[in-house]
Image: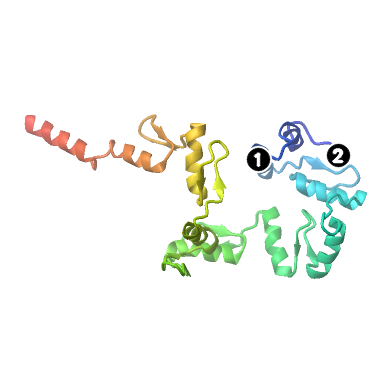
Amino acid sequence: MAQAGSGSPTSVSQNFGDGSPAEVSLRRDTSKVQDHTGEKTYRCEQCDYSTTKKRNFDYHLTKHNGKKPYMCGECGATLGSQLAKQADEKPYVCGECGYRAAQKFTLTEHLRTHTGERPFKCDRCNYSAASKSTLDRHLTTHTGEKRFMCGECGYRAARKKSTLGRHLARHAGKKPLMCEECGYRTASKAHLAQHVRIHTGEKPFKCDQCDYSAAQKSALSVHLAKHTSKNPTRLGNDKKKKIKI
């Protein structure tokens, strides 16, 4: 019904049509590039609507064709009937992607994900946020406030979902994140990303004084010590040289 331009995300779907992590990652990266360039690859042939995201485009097409492709296997309810229910519970709808909200201010915050607007500014650095709650979380990096506490051991965290959530997973013995290459499991996204570099060979941490690179930041820190006078071995060598002179 609608044709995407050359090199569009549609070609990504043809190459990685299995919903694999590679497809999801490539689509996300392609979408980010389009967000920066402002290019709206997906254009509707029935009206003047256009967008950078395929999911938004697919949602828009349902307004023209009336199709309800998603059905519940338990009760037979279609996406259309679910949307009708949501229309009563969440009357505020985003015209860009179909997101629904129960309150107007929630929709206003959501719209900023499309416009890129970040009206909430940090008065201690140049950080800005799309919502006040996001700014409040950021401010804890300056104040050191840790409002969320673990009931098991008293550990405190500034962020409930990410930091405290990972900590609680350790108590429960849960490791929901898995490496698809070897089966390694962890509760931390950062640890998984670090582990995956073993397979990919990626070394993103670069030394600015030589061509050394490392897969881990800690390894780079150890290397940098070789360039500085803080390294004990180098200090010892310097002293020996001075004695000889």
Residue assigned mark 2: 2
Name the residue at 56% across, 58% down.
128
Q: Is residue 123 visible?
A: no
* Camera-nearest residue between 229 and 152: 152
Within the image, what quadrant is residue 37 found in? top right
Residue 82: image location, x then y, percent: 83, 61
Q: Is residue 224 left or right of residue 215?
A: left
Which mark lies nearer to you, 1 or 2? 2
* Camera-nearest residue between 140 and 146: 146
Asked whether the beta carbons under mark 1 and mark 2 sit within 8 Å of each other, the answer is no
Q: Is residue 103 visible?
A: yes
Residue assigned mark 1: 33
Where is 10 relative to 35, above or below? Answer: above
Name the amino acid, label 1. Answer: Val
The C terminus: image quadrant: top left
Name the amino acid, label 2. Answer: Ala
Spatial separation of the CA atoms under disc 1 and disc 2: 21 Å
User: How many neighbours does mark 1 have within 10 angstroms: few (below 14), some (14-19), or many (20 or more)?
Assistant: few
Name the residue at 32% across, 40% down.
222
* Camera-nearest residue between 55 and 176: 176
Which of the two discs, 1 and 2, labels the residue nearer the N terminus? Answer: 2
Where is 122 relative to 221, above or below? Answer: below
The N terminus: image quadrant: top right
Residue 38: image location, x then y, percent: 71, 44
Where is 172 relative to 219, above or below? Answer: below
* Element on which disc 2 rests: loop
